[in-house]
Amino acid sequence: MADRRRVKLGIFIFLLGFAGLIAFFITSLLIVGLAAFAAMVGGIVMVTGSLKASIAPRRPPGPNLKQRMNDGLASFEEKLRDRRRR
């Protein structure tokens, strides 16, 4: 449900930025144009982030970073020991 709300908010922010862009063309104030551009980009980022989060498959959590680092270090040590034995 929160994803839908974020999508709607992102669309609203984009449309607000688009209206600001039209205001920029009318007034020719640079700050209005920059704010409009930032709002449009922010709205698009918000919508795509929400859609990506809702489409992404839910995977069970894997091993945490500490476990992966320990496994990698153990593998590295084993390779070094094998080289020394030769």
Image: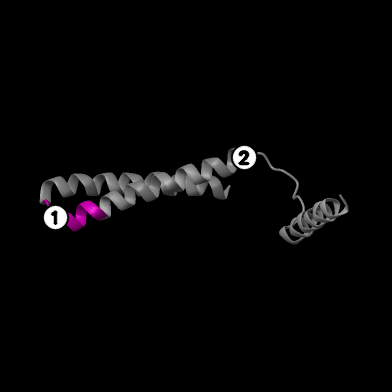
Q: Which residue lies furthest to the right in this view?
A: 85
Q: Earlier in the sequence, mark 1 or mark 2?
A: 1
Extent of the magenta region: 28-34
Q: Position of residue 21 (x, y in %)?
A: 22, 46
Disc 2 target residue: 56
Decide which of 1, 69 is in the foreground and name it.
69
Disc 1 target residue: 29
Q: Where is residue 24 in the image (x, y as percent from the top left)?
A: 17, 49
Decide which of 16, 71 is in the foreground and name it.
71
- What amino acid is found at the position of numbered circle 1 in the picture? Leu
Identify the residue at image location x=81%, y=57%: 77
Q: Where is residue 83 in the image (x, y as percent from the top left)?
A: 82, 51
Q: State whether the magenta stretch is mostly helix, strand or loop.
A: helix
Identify the residue at image location x=27%, y=44%: 18
Identify the residue at image location x=14%, y=45%: 25
Q: Is-magenta flag for residue 49?
A: no
Horizontal arrangement in the rendering, residue 20 relative to residue 54 (left or right): left
- What amino acid is found at the position of numbered circle 2 in the picture? Ala
Q: How far apart are marks 1 and 2 (CA)?
A: 41 Å
When the figure is inspected, residue 73 is found, relative to residue 25, above or below; the finding is: below
Q: What element carries label 1?
A: loop
Horizontal arrangement in the rendering, residue 26 relative to residue 19 (left or right): left
Q: How many labels does the image show?
A: 2
Horizontal arrangement in the rendering, residue 18 relative to residue 86 (left or right): left
Could you say which quadrant of the image residue 74 lies in?
bottom right
Q: Residue furthest front?
A: 86
Decide which of 30, 73 is in the foreground and name it.
73
Decide which of 49, 82 is in the foreground and name it.
82
**Label 2: how many Cα within 10 Å (few below 14, some 14–19, many 20+):** few
Q: Position of residue 55 (x, y in %)?
A: 59, 38
Q: What element carries label 2?
A: loop
